[in-house]
Image: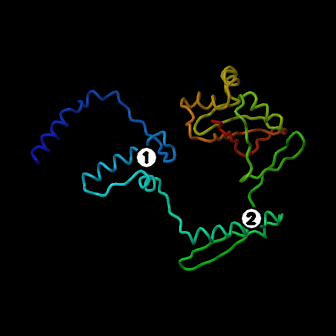
Amino acid sequence: ASMDDNDELDKIAKSLPSPKTLGDFKLTPVEFEKDDDSNFHIDFITAASNLRAENYKIATADRHKTKFIAGKIIPAIATTTALVTGLVVLELYKIIDGKDDIEQYKNGFVNLALPFFGFSEPIASPKGKYQGKNGEVVIDKLWDRFDTEDVTLEQFLKNFADKGLEITMISSGVSLLYASFYPAAKNKDRLPLKLSELVETISKKPIPEHQKNVIFEITAEDTTEEDVEIPFVQLKMRK
């Protein structure tokens, strides 16, 4: 049987193409995404790992167990979950009660194994401001953001101009979508494109079907022509 196996291995090895014929091939890394069933990442990992498991007489794993391991999903203990939920609800009561004094709220630190229970007062999130058309606008740097529909780039720029903000640069991921220092002809070609089309055109790849939103980082000047730090912009994808 071992001879048969060796013969079969030699046959497979000889059937492989010569390395010289693979010179034009290029490997492209794929970003692992466990929650998108259409990309077959979990299916591939399940099949490949089970083939190896059978060779080494290791117990095989089903698709759900593969997703659990490959996705580094950490199981939650029911007692801890119940405790954390209770602490969250206590803070929710304070919000419903209309408490606006940050000292009334608490951060909780818990370790049931020790056991240890500690509480501290939260730190207020940093604030920013800019001069809009109707005066000073205060923004929360941690929690505030702008939401937008899938409008054209031209309309997007106008919407912010109406807020008193002149956008000088727009980026999404590693793609620079718009810049005031670009040649006028280059920006003119992009103005009629919807934001989703702009992202796909510049990045040269489609927005994944499972992606629920696209994040834009922008730099802008306010009505005083000062550069201001403003929150990101979120485009919700409608499938």
Q: Amino acid at mark 1?
A: Ile
User: Residue 207 or 126: which is nearer the viewer?
Assistant: 207
- The single residue placed furthest to the bottom in the displayed view is 115
Q: Quadrant of the C terminus?
A: top right
Q: Of all residues shown, which one is farthest toward the right?
A: 134
Residue 44, image x, y percentages: 39, 44
Out of 94 and 29, give the one closest to the viewer.
Answer: 94
Picture coordinates of residue 77 (x, y %)? 53, 68
Tell me the number on the disc at residue 33: none
Q: Nearer the viewer, residue 31 or 91?
A: 91
Based on the displayed image, in which of its 4 quarters is residue 202 positioned?
Answer: top right
Q: Secondary structure at mark 2?
A: helix
What amino acid is labelled 2 in the image? Answer: Leu
- What is the basis of the colouring in this image? rainbow
What residue sits 69% from the left and 35% below the top? 169
The quadrant in which residue 99 appears is bottom right
As helix, strand or loop, the secondary structure at mark 1 comes to: helix
The residue at which mark 1 appears reads as 42
Q: Where residue 39 sits: x, y (%)?
A: 47, 39
Residue positioned 43% across, 39% down in the render: 29
Q: Which residue is mark 2?
A: 92
Q: Residues within 10 Å of mark 1 (few under 14, many from 20)?
A: many
Image height check: is 107 above or below 30?
below
Q: Residue at x 67, y 21 (%)?
A: 189
Q: Position of residue 83 (x, y in %)?
A: 63, 71
Mark 1 or mark 2, earlier in chain: 1
3D distance between C-alphas at marks 1 and 2 = 37 Å
> Could you classify mark 2 by the number of other residues whose Cα lies within 10 Å: few (under 14), some (14-19), or many (20 or more)?
few
The answer to whether residue 36 is above or below residue 119 is: above
